[in-house]
Amino acid sequence: MQGNSQQQAYDRGTNIFSPDGRLYQVEYAREAVKRGSPTVGVRFEDGVVFVAGGRLRSSLQVAESIEKIHKADDHVGVASAGHVADARQLVDVARRQAQVERLRYSEPADIESLTKEVTGYIQEFTQAGGARPFGAALLVGGVDDGGTPRLFETDPSGTPYEWEAVAIGGNADQIQGHLEAEYEAGIDAEAALELALRALEDANEGGGLNAEGMSAAVVDDDGFRELSPDELSDTIAGHSLDDEPEE
Amino acid sequence: MDGFTSGKGATDGAPEELKTGTTTVGIVADDGVVLATDRRASLGGRFVSNKSADKIIEVHPEAAITISGGVGDGQTFADQLRAQSSLYETRRGEDMSMEALASAAANAIRGMRVVPLLGGVDSEGPRLFELDPLGGKMEDTYGSTGSGMQMAYGVLEGGYEDDLTMDEAEEVALDAIEAASARDTASGNGAMVARITEEGIDTEEIDAEEI
């Protein structure tokens, strides 16, 4: 037993490498992200759309209490996959940092620096003793001061990645496959929203999408805007992606 | 809290401090609040260092402050309040009430050498607050701060009535600034006026001859 626990010590702390150079706790955190429902981000000509999947645990649960897409500042949205509680902490880091940038420079934070502030924060939890890495991945997307749309992913190691279209969370690989096959540069907001919904539906094995528990938002020159539940379910039904059985 | 409230006053008794000197006025009217200030900034009230100072600063889409006292503290205070109101609304997804904004302002202002008026409109209607460097917060329907306040108050006491229209309130406010500019050496160089309604803030600069 003693020998066994010695052997697995690198598995226990976030700040301990395994003999082959891996950080197991960070890899386990990535697994935690995969266990959640998927979240998709798509960059379009003037902005970024987010769509988050999700499911109500009970007919008594209030749908709006499932929060996976958040406004970080007027021009930035953050969508999450994985542990929601962990993600909420990171969202607040982004919100505070967005205001700090405005205070410091009297201009809105650009999406890349804001993402890197958040990933810097995430990274500290993979190196400090006694800490646990964040079990959440984020999509940080918005429009820079010059009007350029940007979309970034943060993962539990604290690495930032930039994407044109990306899926995180459960079924991410399959959704990403759909995005890779269907994404076209220069599409408009409507087409980007449709692509995100189709990719989610595709990964649902043709089971259709149920707007309850899902959420969607658009960030463009007019700022961050979350779709109302009716708007989202109408859009889903409009593309015949809903899970209502055919009459 | 959040790193926005580290307000720290300038060195005590610095003789060359950049001051607004200043006369600022605020009046609650039927559909909103009118704020007005003069435009002079001075060094210790004895040298005109700027003739087009902006002493009305937006801190929210429907709220603004006038600043009187240290220019640096006034600007920093306004920046911090803007960051706080923006963060409040981003976190909660709802508008910040004037009551909440005034309380946040009174907490943030402690130790700063600035005496602002805070005016704004929320779902309850137009509100005006006088703030002070020790964290005081008093609501009123009209008020004035700055070295020209005695002259301004004289005009306000004669001209203010309940339920003034926005145009009438603007006229009284500008009369008050004009009276103060005529007799207070640290006030002058025209005026700035802001009309705050639920539609937002409309700011105008007015030359000395046109008041």
Image (spheres, rainbow, N blue to C red):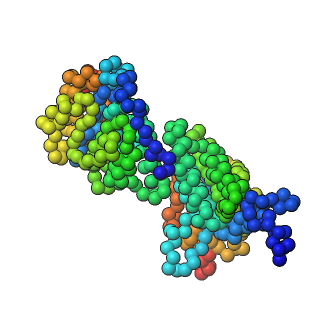
Residue at the limit of the structure toward the front, as seen here: A2
Counting the numbered discs, the total is 0
Q: Quadrant of residue B118?
A: top left
Report whether residue A207 is seen. yes
Q: Relative to residue B100, is residue A243 depicted above or below?
A: below
Q: Relative to residue A192, is residue B3 depicted above or below?
A: above
Residue at the limit of the structure toward the right, as seen here: A20
Closer to the camera in the image, A152 or B85:
B85
Closer to the camera in the image, B63 or A187:
B63
Q: Which residue is drawn at 59% across and 39% down?
A: A146
Closer to the camera in the image, A49 or B87:
B87
Q: In which quarter of the image is residue B38?
A: top left
Q: Relative to residue A43, is residue A35 depicted above or below?
A: below
Report whether residue A164 is seen. no
Q: Where is residue A238 in the image (x, y as percent from the top left)?
A: 58, 66
Left/right of residue A61 with respect to residue A169 in the rendered view: left
The C terminus of chain B: image quadrant: top left
Q: Which residue is drawn at 34% across and 23% down?
A: B44
Residue at the limit of the structure toward the left, as seen here: B158
Q: Where is residue B87 in the image (x, y as percent from the top left)?
A: 47, 51
Q: Residue at x 20, y 22 (%)?
A: B183
Q: Relative to residue A212, is residue B64 depicted above or below?
A: above
Q: Position of residue A234 (x, y in %)?
A: 54, 67
Q: Quadrant of residue B115?
A: top left
Left/right of residue A109 with respect to residue B13 in the rendered view: right
